[in-house]
Image (cartoon, rainbow, N blue to C red):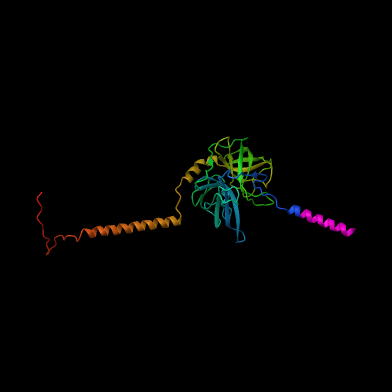
Amino acid sequence: MRTTLLRIAALAVVALAVLVSAPKPAQAIANGEDVASGEYGFSVLLTMTGLPAADQGSRDSSCSGALVAPRWVITAGHCFRDGSGRRVDRTVARRTTATIGRTALADRTGHEIDVVAVRQSASADVALAELGEPVTDVTPLRVGAAPARPGEVVRLTGWGLTSYDVGDTVDRLQTGEFVVTGVDDVTVSMAGRAPRADTSACPHDSGGPYFRTGDGDRPELVAVVSRGPACPHTGDDTAARTDNLAAWVAATTAEASQPDSRLRWLGLSLAGGVLAVLVVVIRLRRGRRGPARPHGRLGDPARRQPSSVR
């Protein structure tokens, strides 16, 4: 009898362990919800591969962001930091890739493009990442010029973790609604609203866009994820304002992008080819004119031909 009871207890422990360890649905933006296929195509996953690690090795990481111009993604400035934690105007990882226009990572839609340059805001935790090639089939998220208002409801999209402790990665873009609770010169305070009061940004949601979505209106960026408590949680997260950076974003994204090395090589090759063709044409024209007549020299005067009557 005792043996039977021990066996039953052991089986119960095993069953409980299986239930506890069973995979949970991944849902970045803690307690958020899945984004419908094709929605919010401007949302971006920034994947950093080969970041320098403290042990002299390397590690991988990621951030969220939004496409704000065909070649530019807005994100958090702290997504690009050197070994000392200082924000820098360059990529830090061996490779940084932007995934754009894709709701689920398993999809074959959208784009995967390398980040080739970074511009940091001088006043806020905001950066612009330049893409190696333009995205022309996704409508960029417009940067709003009006500040967020206390009480205003905005939406967030992101590719972050499930929670601060569990650390589950996600394979589908997540979203949630937030209410603005405060605004200062450089930041906006946001609190979860839906699907739950503890809907909140998590690690790797950094740089994710908070945007307003009026009825029938084009979405408009108001802030990006910057920092906050361990998630999920009720209460405020801190976002970096973008409305007061609209002029900087417009000026930066209007910069003429530098052509990559392949384009430079092609340009030089074409220029060299055109020059060679011009040299050949000039030589051929000179050859058709025949030998040049000698001009008078001392001891060998050139014969002068009588001029024709006009």
Asked if residue 196 lies in the magenta stretch, the reply is no
Query: In screen coordinates, is 225 left or right of 24?
Result: left
- Nearest the camera: 244 or 29? 29
> Is residue 291 toward the left or the right of residue 54 in the image?
left
Secondary structure of the magenta portion, mostly? helix
Q: Which residues are magenta?
A: 1-17
Q: Is residue 201 above or below residue 49?
A: above
Pick out the residue farthest to the bottom: 299
The one nearer the camera, 135 or 165, is 135
Question: Whole-percent x and y of residue 142?
Answer: 53, 41
Where is residue 57 shown, x and y percent of the image? 60, 61
> Would you identify the image quadrant in which residue 1 lies?
bottom right
Residue 147, quarter of the rendered image: top right
Q: What residue sits 84% from the left and 56% below the top?
A: 8
Question: x and y percent of residue 40 in the render?
Answer: 57, 43
**Percent x, y for residue 270?**
38, 56
